Amino acid sequence: MVRAERHRRGDAVVAASLVVVVGLAAALLAVFSPAANTTSVTAASPVPTVPLEPADVPDPLSEAWRAPSAATTTPVAVGPVVVTGDSEQPPGGSPAGVVLGRDPLTGQPRWSYRRNLPLCAVGSAWDLALAVFRRSGYCGEVTGLSAQTGARGPQRNSDVSPDARLLDDGYLVTASGPTYLETWRSDLVETLSYGAERANPQPDRQPRTGCRHESIAVTRGRLGVLERCAGESIDRLTMLRPDSNETERPPEQFSVTLPTTGARLVAISDDSEAVLAPNPTRLSIRDGTGTELASYPLELPACDLAGDPPGGVVPTAVFSDASSNVVLWWTGSRTVALDASDLRPLWTVPDTLGPGTPWAGRLVVPVPSGLAVVDSDTGAVLRAVPVDRAGYRGPVTLRGVGPILLEQRGPTIVALGGAR
């Protein structure tokens, strides 16, 4: 005869303890998981295709809409939407970061993503909007959002600094920082980390941890860092390979000291680097080993050379058509075109507010009075298009989206369009 199972008092205590532990775990998950305090509103219907660009730059141009976007440093357009990012401060509440996918023609939101965390940066890659949120002093909560719908995609936790910039090389994204950077592939898995690691640093993994990353530039397969390192009185140029997947140690192509300090890494190509060097002011072109190939004297005002570039990134853009393939570099007072292959300077447009962008089959460059339509082969200004910026005099970065030209003016995105 089988005896009836007896329930001991200890069993009840264990069961009660398990209930408490599970309940506590569920509560912690509800508070600290990425889904906690998150509101995601996806697109109610398919986002319409963006109309084609105009045949030429319209004149006049007028404001179509504007929106706050302090989390972007240049207009972000991905797929059929313009992506803006800003923070809200509810009365008596915590800061909340809001990312919106907007109709390029009207500025109306098509989808939104909101978290009860400050928003650090917004960028784009792989047909995703990338939103980086801040928790515990670091901007490490990264979420990919579908451009079409706003639906959540890949996510990761990182140790990105609060002033991070997101640099897309067409294949990978690098999150910059003054002492540490990371590179991610399309599923947001890390392919490279470089600098002073905060979490679980591995001895001898990083070649230099006592350095500041004063300027950073990327191109596919190459990541350049201009560093100032403890114990060195001159600058250092380091070239990394971000796509090697060698996780034990950051793979270097080279790391060399420069015969100066106060330099900036302007741009890199497949096998060259352009470094702005002071005293005398010149553009130093270096090869795949860091050796100087050529030096071009430059006439720049002192204000263009003061300090380091905001966020460690020199403002550049790329223009390419049937006859031209150039990197547009904004020095702080003028736009300089560099040959995209060997990075030698080709021409200069003085008195500009930003690097410029391709739009409507032309190269357009922001100037104090509006826009200059520039010949991309020679730098000659073909015509001027007035734009009323209502007293704004700061830097302007541009991005064309169909019939709309976007301007980033400080923490605000302004959309310009011609008469319809």
Image (tube, rainbow, N blue to C red):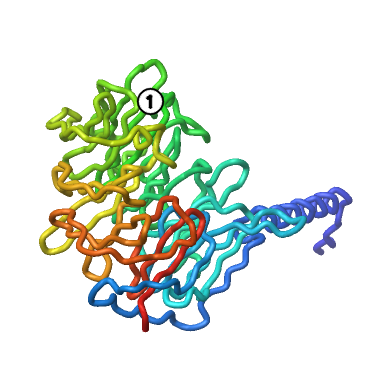
With 271 as the anchor, is 103 left or right in this view?
A: right
- Splitting the image into 4 quarters, where does residue 290 fall? top left
On the rendered image, what quadrant is the C terminus found in?
A: bottom left
Q: Residue 272 appears at what percent x and percent y?
A: 18, 39
On the rendered image, what quadrant is the N terminus found in?
A: bottom right
User: Residue at image x 43%, y 65%?
Assistant: 388
- Splitting the image into 4 quarters, where does residue 195 fall? top left
User: Residue at image x 34%, y 47%?
Assistant: 315
Residue hosting label 1: 228
User: Residue at image x 52%, y 35%?
Assistant: 199
Q: Residue 13 appears at what percent x and percent y?
A: 85, 50
- Against 220, residue 256 (above or below) is above
Q: Is residue 419 among the parts visible in the rendering?
A: yes
Q: Between 338 and 241, which is closer to the camera in this rendering?
A: 338
- Against 79, residue 263 (above or below) is above
- Splitting the image into 4 quarters, where does residue 129 fall? bottom left
Q: Between 147 and 163, which is closer to the camera in this rendering?
A: 163
